[in-house]
Image (spheres, rainbow, N blue to C red):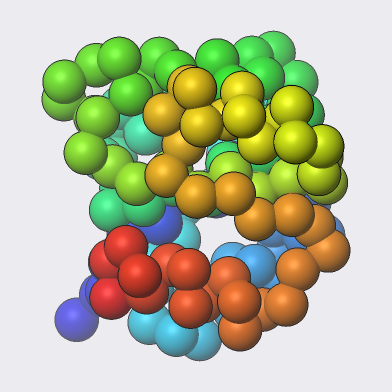
Amino acid sequence: MPGKKILVVDDETELVAMVKMRLEANRYEVITAADGQEGLDAARRERPDLILLDLMLPKIDGYKVCGLLKADTRFRAIPVIVFTARAQDSDKKMAEETGADAYLTKPFEPQALLKKIAEFIG
């Protein structure tokens, strides 16, 4: 039986592969997207249980993706964990303003990521 579905939106292919492997090992179903537009389309099509979203993405940045999803009543309830190398307070504030539910900075501890995911979807 597949577990909860997580969408990982990041353009760093090695990081995505590592995160995907870690999540699948913890019985999550993982969908990936390499840019903001692809991530937005995948979120709308797949309706994941949670989204891990980088901020610095090709095509549409993570702030815009988060804002568009949170402005839409069909997707508003999906938790979005911003997952980025940007650690400035201004970045965190902007992510909060667009509706992000949590903020994790890279590099990260895999256990911290799993714990944060479990807070939202078990």
Q: Is residue 54 left or right of residue 47?
A: right
Which of the 4 image quadrants contains residue 74? Answer: top left
Q: Closest to the observer: 23 or 53?
A: 53
Q: Residue at x 37, y 34 (%)?
A: 43
Instruction: Give the image location of residue 11, x and y in percent.
Output: 76, 39
Residue 66 shows in this picture: no
Q: How many marks?
A: 0
Residue 7 shows in this picture: yes
Quadrant occupied by the N terminus = bottom left
Instruction: Give the image location of residue 70, x and y in percent.
Output: 33, 24
Q: Is residue 44 left or right of residue 51?
A: left
Look at the picture and state if 113 lies above or below 8: below
Instruction: Give the image location of residue 35, x and y in percent.
Output: 66, 28
Q: Is residue 35 left or right of residue 87?
A: left
Which of the 4 image quadrants contains residue 56? Answer: top right
Q: Is residue 121 left or right of residue 19?
A: left
Q: Residue at x 28, y 53 (%)?
A: 49
Look at the picture and state if 116 lies above or below 71: below
Quadrant occupied by the C terminus = bottom left
Q: Closest to the observer: 57 or 31?
A: 57
Q: Residue at x 74, y 54 (%)?
A: 105
